[in-house]
Amino acid sequence: MARSTDRSKRKASGGRYHFTRGKKRQELAGFQANTKLSPERKVKSIRVRGGEAKFSMLAASHVNVCDKKGKASKVEILNVVGNPANPHLVRRNIITKGAIVETKMGKVRITSRPGREAALNGVLVA
């Protein structure tokens, strides 16, 4: 069965919504990017409605880190240390927004959405 982004089949009260049409192509949900820590950067292009393109990062090795003074620099990622969204992603070295990664500058929290923006930005964690 196709995954969809439309509203639930149930109301808050538990009653059912009765749909008058089926799923549309633009309502179908995509798969998770699961951006991995890898020595080579890998980006995938996804065609969306209107012929436009979205870019999804599948693998990354560097992060753009912004320090306390606002200076940004490109730093290599050593390891994924923590992820408040899902601790199982840490074992698989998957990078998501909010993940804590270890770099040469110290621990960095990822502030971008690599599966949606194809960029990896972060800020230093004290």
Image (spheres, rainbow, N blue to C red):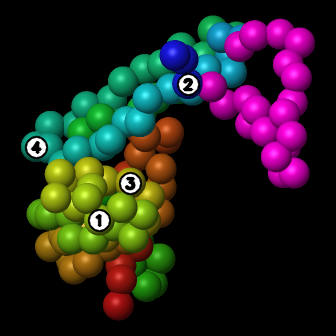
Q: Which residue is mark 3?
A: 96
Question: What segment is highlighted magenta in the picture?
Answer: 4-23
Q: Amino acid at mark 4?
A: Pro
Identified at 32% across, 41% down, the residue is 34
Q: Give the number of the disc on residue 87.
A: 1
| Residue 61: image location, x then y, percent | 19, 49
Q: Which residue is mark 4?
A: 39
- Residue 6 on the magenta segment: yes
Q: Amino acid at mark 2?
A: Arg
Upstream in sequence: badge 3 or badge 2: 2
Identified at 44% across, 29% down, the residue is 31
Upstream in sequence: badge 3 or badge 4: 4
* Contact (Cβ within 8 Å) of mark 1 with mark 3: no
Upstream in sequence: badge 4 or badge 1: 4
Q: Is residue 13 visible?
A: yes
Q: Which residue is mark 2?
A: 3
Query: Hey, which quadrant is residue 88 in on the image?
Result: bottom left
